[in-house]
């Protein structure tokens, strides 16, 4: 029973934190347009600062912690991937380009044949 009560309180606190983070982000965006007469550099820095504060606030929630954990796991998985060498990448790109050219020529020929057939059927000039 006590654990459920703490979960509900934590969930309400998390909801409040997420709403606060959204409010901070919206405040930064509104401030960007409100202070239109100021330098664009300062306005952009204000939005970036608001976004960083919103990220910091939301990272303290359970959802934020899950997202951070997901990011760490994704980074580990990316490290496990065997990436192709430069030579393999160039060879594959070349093969794709050749295939695109061949298919393009084929479609061009089909288009010419169909255009001639339609011209013959309709008796066009």
Image: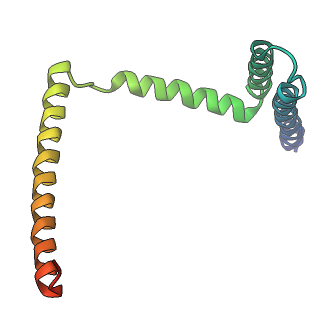
Of the 4 image quadrants, the one containing the C terminus is bottom left
Nearer the observer, 52 or 111: 111
Tell me residue 124's x, y (percent): 17, 81
Residue 39: percent from left, percent from top: 80, 13
Q: In this view, does 110 lie above or below 40?
A: below
Residue at the (11%, 74%) spot, across then down: 116
In the shown orientation, is residue 112 left or right of residue 23?
left
Residue at left offset 89%, top offset 22%: 35
**Residue 121: image location, x then y, percent:** 13, 86
Q: In which quarter of the image is the N terminus?
A: top right
31 shown above or below 108: above
Q: Nearer the viewer, residue 119 or 97?
A: 119
Q: Is residue 50 left or right of residue 111?
A: right
Q: Nearer the viewer, residue 3 or 114?
A: 114
Outermost residue toward the front in this view: 125
Choose top left, top right, bottom left or bottom right for residue 51.
Answer: top right
The residue sitting at 41% across, 28% down in the picture is 77
* Residue 95 locus on image (x, y percent): 12, 38
Res. 19 image quadrant: top right
């Amino acid at each position: 029973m006590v654990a459920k009560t703490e979960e509900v309180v934590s969930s309400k606190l998390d909801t409040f934190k997420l709403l606060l983070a959204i409010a901070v982000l919206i405040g930064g965006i509104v401030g960007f347009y409100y202070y239109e007469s100021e330098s664009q550099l300062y306005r952009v820095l204000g939005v970036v600062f608001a976004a960083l504060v919103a990220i910091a606030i939301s990272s303290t929630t359970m959802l934020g912690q899950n997202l951070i954990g997901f990011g760490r796991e994704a980074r580990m998985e990316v490290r496990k991937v065997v990436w192709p060498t430069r030579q393999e990448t160039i060879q594959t790109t070349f093969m794709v380009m050749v295939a695109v050219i061949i298919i393009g020529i084929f479609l061009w020929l089909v288009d010419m044949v169909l255009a001639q057939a339609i011209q013959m059927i309709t008796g066009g000039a």
